[in-house]
Image: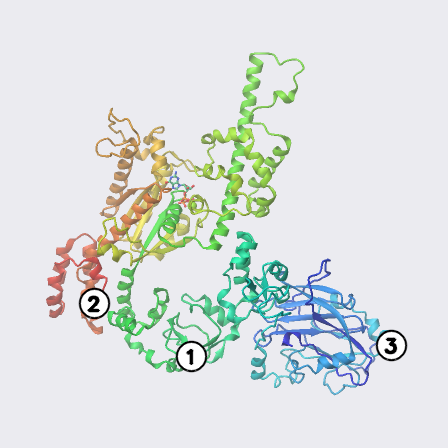
Amino acid sequence: MPPKEAIVFPSLEDDEDQHYSFAVEYTGPPVTYDLPRAVPINVEKIPVAAVVSKVPLHTELHIPVVPPILAPDRNKFSKELLLQPTVSPTSVIAFEERVSDDTNNCLLSGELSSYESGELVELINNDDTSSRRLAACSVSNEHSSKLDSCDSFDKSRGSSSQARISNDDDLNQPDWGSNESVLSLDYPSSRVSSLKTGDCNNESNGDVRRPQAVTFGDIESDDGLDEEFSQDQVQAQVVRVKREPQTKGKKGSCYRCFKGNRFTEKEVCIVCDAKYCSNCVLRAMGSMPEGRKCVTCIGFPIDESKRGVLGKFSRMLKRLLNDLEVRQIMKAEKLCEANQLPPEYIFVNGQPLCYEELAILQSCPNPPKKLKPGNYWYDKVFGLWGKEGQKPSNIISPHLNVGGLTSDVAVGRSSSCRQPTLLGYIWGKAGTKLVCAVLSLPVPSKSSNPCGESLNSVTSRSVPDYLEQRTLQKILLVGSSGSGSSIIFKQAKILYKDVPFSEDERESIKLTIQTNVYGYLGMLLEGRERFEEESLAEMWKRGSKDTEPEAGSSDDADSKTIYSIGPRLKSFSDWLLKTMVSGNLEAIFPAATREYAPLVEELWKHTAIQETYNRRSELEMLPSVASYYLERVVEILKTDYEPSDLDILYAEGVTSSNGLACVDFSFPQSSPDENSGTADQHDSLLRYQLIRVQARGFGENCKWLEMFEDVGMVIFCVALSDYDQFSADGTNKMLLNKKFFETIVTHPSFDQMEFLLILNKFDMFEEKIERVPLTRCEWFDDFHPLISRHRTNTNSNNINNNPTLGQLAFHYVAVKFKRLYSSLTGRKLYVSHVKGLEPKSVDAALKLAREILKWDEERVNFSLMYILRRVNAQEKTFALTYLEAVRLCIKANFGIVLGVMILCFIRPPVRWEVDVLPITFIKIPGFLANLF
Ligand SMILES: Nc1nc2c(ncn2[C@@H]2O[C@H](COP(=O)(O)OP(=O)(O)OP(=O)(O)O)[C@@H](O)[C@H]2O)c(=O)[nH]1
Ligand SMILES: [Mg+2]
């Protein structure tokens, strides 16, 4: 019997007929009737002292003092079933089960006092994610004695039980109470009050043959049990026993119907390895709240050999269930608490981990990959990680407070990997890279860089900074609200990431989209009301003018227009508008999608809404993307809706509006037919990081801007279509953009920084400029384009011969910004027009950003890396200062000549001149420079 089922019974040699009750886990077939529920309590939060029954307290009576039960040490105990003393031989009073898992609410608890023997009780976990069924049973003294002597229970340890039932004779226990009192421990008094104390004490009660006394072994009490809880014993307890299947037929057959052979397709329980055929699997596994487990295995830890299959569905499940169900089950299987890796299975430097340590390990920037139970060694200084007795398998984040030994000992286990700290950050060095490649040794990822940070001196730290810059180029994307920065960010994800959005992201984006769609619907309903009022007013006006209202025509008929809806839809519409106004739209999800889908469908198909939708251009609040979703409103508001990449791209509110979002990517290699060379291949190896921050995210006076001074360039995003828009205080939005642009480009953090201005929403701009003059914005009041008479096609792309008005206006706006930038910084601004909704357009703009970075790099590349390779550690400080001066000169557009002059004037060591000067005049191709 596994320890969790250990039940403690008193020795009752003296009374063979005595009956006692206890709770065991119910393992029979599913029951058809509703089970009474035992409500959980969280004992951690309610330290409860013992409740003493209403015994007449004699002065000489010695009442045992029971300390409050503290939270169990989760490392010490796996599972224990605690039995409270029974009062009546045929009823169970109370029990509780401790489950050692990684939650704080690890206590299951219930009360069986009112249940008959054999009756089932559903035991609910505190977080309501799992429940257990227990049967109240009664056993004879004989059986209880057997249970008492059961192997799995080591009475002397006292650890498997919190409460022990005893008879009068067993008085050699130190803190046993009076033979007249009944105590209950770690149980709220309110609940304990259900104990029929009278029953316990009243000897005249026929049910009670003998008064009972209880003693309690507190988990962490210091009442002499400490020695008993030796470390070894505690460790012994955490060995989890593999659960055996309930039934087993002939070899290869289904464990439930006993049909089939080993070739029959079967689904396997990840706990007990029971195999079920497709006819039985759903019956045997139920709704699978913890994935593929028999109903009776729910709550049990998985068989560790099956960890690899967690979350990987079988073809059988896919056939039996729909996609959504399979995904939910797989998600639960991977993420539910019961299936998480038990920390005590992982030994690091000889010591088992505790929950906190495992959490640290798994959440560090560079965690071990595919962590499995076993013995590992970990070098805290270098972050080397490997299986005990083997070479390092990868480099994880260093300085994690996990495992037993210091790094010295750990390194001793694999001395070949030990490196003196004096070497500094060695991973960037070509030699190290080569050695690692030859010996198949792991190399730390860039994210595990803290290692380098903490080890290096100030001078040597600059070296990897240069190298780092060359491998991960950071690009800051900024723009004021509505400029389209988040759409560009999302486009980058979709364009350059293999998996742009994770399952979880998609799930939350789905809710966002559905909320948005309700919002758009609300705007339509608002518009409908307005249009209805307008047409009614018009009707009445016309009616009073043209004809007298016909005698007998009802008021109702008069007050109907194409925008009118029936009372039922009207009340739904009123409710939705009210919810929107109160800002509670999010609160009605996800129930809304289920409950209101039919109403939404009816509403959408109604002529009144369709007519309103036809006039959507008049609804100012309705964003242009709204129609994309409203066309598919019925499909989107269904529960099984799965957003496509395009849906996500168009969705508003997906990237946090004031927060920071970043994505790492490489530009994919161009297709073979495109003109690609070695440089292009090289580019696909370079990593870029796009960091998107919205204006609000910089805080007051852009105080957080300093955080981004290590970026390689800034992309500033402006919506071209803002020129005729005004903010709430009446300021033109283009002027607000201009002001924000000035703040950013003149910020000291971005001194000498390259800027690319993206003039976004070019599609809207081209369309709008035909209707609304650009001069609507006072900054553009001198825009007087010469328009060719031969201009026939407004969308012509032939910008040189016959530019469209939109193109002319774009150039004008671009020049305005360029002049502004030049006047503020004395530098050149790069500008690109973009249609944010078109991937190609965004791709072109981001590739332009890459080119700008490259030009910038190449200008600086001439000698820096070359010099750095040649100097020794002492010369490094001087070298770096020197090179920085050259770099700044070049960057500041003083030109190469000046850079070289400085090289000559400052007179670096002679051998540098010999090495460097000749190369300074040779442009090192980007890919060569990156090898250094
Ligand atoms: N027609 C058109 N719409 C665009 C374009 N770029 C963005 N939009 C839409 O403009 C709206 C605002 O774009 P976002 O990318 O969310 O703007 P933002 O800079 O993130 O601003 P906030 O969302 O306010 O933080 C969205 O509805 C986009 O779909 C474009 O080039 N053309
Ligand atoms: Mg946005």
- Residue 451 is situated, as x and y percent measured from the top left of the image, at 35, 70
Mark number for residue 911?
none
Mark number for residue 868?
2
Q: Which residue is mark 1?
A: 388
State the residue at coordinates (57%, 47%): 589
Q: Regarding ligand 1, which quadrant of the image does it lie in?
A: top left
User: In the image as oriented, which residue stretches furthest toward the bottom?
Assistant: 172
**Residue 320: which quarter of the image?**
bottom right
State the residue at coordinates (27%, 38%): 816
Task: Work out how far the residue at label 3 is from the one at label 1, CA to CA, in angstroms.
Answer: 63 Å
**Kind of residue sitting beneath label 2:** Leu
Among numbered discs 2 and 3, the one appearing first in the sequence: 3
- Residue 150 is situated, as x and y percent measured from the top left of the image, at 68, 81
Q: Residues within 10 Å of mark 1 (few under 14, many from 20)?
A: some
- Residue 298 is situated, as x and y percent measured from the top left of the image, at 61, 65
Q: In the figure, 665 relative to 592: above or below? A: below
Q: Quadrant of the N terminus?
A: bottom right
Task: Work out how far the residue at label 2 is from the one at label 3, CA to CA, in angstroms.
Answer: 94 Å
Q: Quadrant of the C terminus?
A: bottom left
Q: Secondary structure at mark 3?
A: loop
